[in-house]
Image (tube, grey):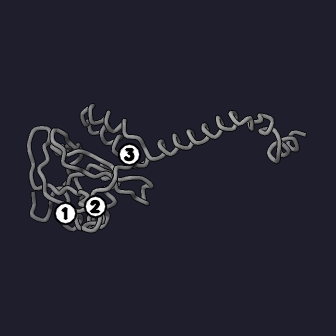
Amino acid sequence: MKKDRTYYFAYGSNLSISQMKVRCPSAKLIRKGQLKDYKLVFSKWSSKWHGAVADIIAAKNNCVWGLVYSLTFKDLHKLDGFEGYPFIYNRKLLSITGTSDLASDIWVYYLPHKFKLRSPAIKYLSILQEAAKTFGFPMSYRKMLCEVKSFESIQAKLLHETISNEYVQDIEDDQFNPLEFYQGDLFDEYEKGTS
């Protein structure tokens, strides 16, 4: 490794090669790797993504899979800006296990202030799922990512439950009238359009 370059381990949205090329033009994908004794979580809300973003927490007998990039220190400082370093994310040097070797002194971003666990947006989560498939992360890790509930799916479920509960309550209160669906402005507009 040249002295003007360093290593960075991505486990969140920077698993997107195209995003990394925009953020850090000097970035070169080295290999996939795993961070042992840590666990992937989603906690900090991101207004950009409209959902929670990834973080790591210490957790024995767990691991986080990701990609190791080589990049210039200049691009590392650019990446700091995208990650909100040092105010939102911080970074530290950790060891990443590769397919056949161990590499130390690789930068890994993490949230120093832990937040309540939340759900990521579908768009964000799909980046992780796609990378896991493309780069051949273990099936157990891919399965875990597929089991993560997206923010949108939780919202849809809550909305469905709310509407269902209101519908059931209307029926129980004898206030539900199916003919109401065929009355009013929408029905009148339909009738005008067909005549």
Q: What residue does disc 3 label?
A: 125
Q: What residue does disc 2 label?
A: 24
Please state if 112 lies on the left or on the right of 123 as rendered.
left
Q: Residue furthest top?
A: 139
Q: From the viewer's side, name the closer residue of 62 and 99.
A: 62
Q: From the viewer's side, name the closer residue of 150 and 125.
A: 150
Callout 1: SS? strand
Task: State the separation of the CA atoms marked 1 and 3.
Answer: 27 Å
Q: Residue at x 26, y 60 (%)?
A: 113
Q: Earlier in the sequence, mark 1 or mark 3?
A: 1
Task: State the separation of the CA atoms marked 1 and 2.
Answer: 8 Å
Which label lies toward us, 1 or 3? 3
Q: What residue does disc 1 label?
A: 72
Q: From the viewer's side, name the closer residue of 14 and 168.
A: 168
Question: Disc number at residue 97?
Answer: none
Mark 1 neighbour density, 10 Å: few (under 14) some (14–19) many (20 or more): some
Q: Looking at the rendering, which quadrant does residue 131 occupy?
A: top left
In the figure, 153 relative to 93: above or below?
above
